Amino acid sequence: MTSLYAHAGGDEGLHRLEEVFYAKALADPVLKPLFPQAMPHHVRNLTWFTAESFGGPDRFTRDLGFKHIINVHRHLQITEEQRQRFVDLYMEAFDEAGLPTDVPFRDAVREHVQFGSHVAMQNSHAETDADLHPLREVPHWNWAGDDQQEPAP
C-alpha cells in the first residue's frame, strides 16, 4: 500500500501544507503566544517531521533528532484551547493546500495531529524529564492511525 507520505504528494505536498499552516499559526491570536515570530527553518522542520512520520525520508531524525522537538515545546505551557486551535488550523491548512481529500487519508492526518498535539502539550508542561511524554522518536504513522499497526489493505 502507498505510504501516507507518497499519498500526500511527498515533500512537495507536505511542504505546501506546512507553509499554509505556519502562515495561519503566525497570524492566529490564540496561537500567537506559541508562534511569536517567523522562524526561518520552521516550515522545513515541520515538513521533515511530517514526512518522516508518514513514511518518507528520516531527515528530521538524522539532522535534528527527536530531542529537538522536545526542547522546542518544553516550557511553552500549551493550553487545551491552543492545542485544539492548532488541530483546527492544521486541518484548515490541509484543505487549503490541496492534499488528497479521501476520508482514510484525512482521518489519518487528523489522528496524527491530535496525537502530536497531546504529546506537545504534555511536554510543554513538563517540569522534569520524568514528566515528559515517553515518546522519544518520530512516530511512524500509517493508514490505521496507529504506529503499532500495519497499514490497512
Image (cartoon, helix red, strand yellow):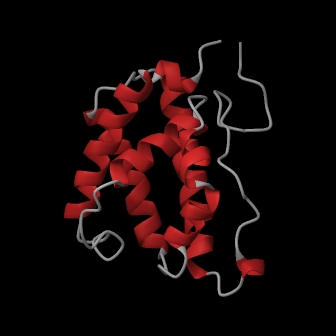
Q: Name the residue furthest front.
A: 63
Q: Is residue 64 above or below residue 54?
A: below
Looking at the rendered image, the quarter that the N terminus falls into is top right
Task: Identify whether 152 is placed above or below 117.
Answer: above
What residue sits 57% from the left and 44% below the top?
112
Give residue 92's position: percent from left, percent from top: 31, 43
Q: Position of residue 104 (x, y in %)?
A: 55, 25
In the shown orientation, is residue 8 left or right of residue 112?
left
Quadrant of res 38: bottom left
Residue 34 horizontal side relative to residue 67, left or right: left
Say whether residue 45 is left or right of residue 71: left
Q: Nearer the viewer, residue 63 or 135?
A: 63
Marker count (numbered) = 0
Question: Which residue is at 71% across, 22% downward?
Answer: 151
Residue 126 makes an appearance in the image? yes
Q: Position of residue 26 (x, y in %)?
A: 24, 62
Residue at image coords 65%, 30%: 142
**In which quadrant will I find the C terminus?**
top right
The residue sitting at the left extreme is 27
**The one of 3 and 92 positioned closer to us in this rendering:** 3
**Quarter where residue 57 is shown:** top right
Is residue 89 visible in the rendered structure shown here? no
Which of the 4 quarters of the picture holds residue 64? bottom right
The answer to whether residue 142 is above or below residue 39 is above
Q: Which residue is rendered at x = 63% and y = 27% of the image? A: 143
Q: x and y percent of residue 52 in the render?
A: 57, 37
State left or right for residue 99 relative to residue 32: right
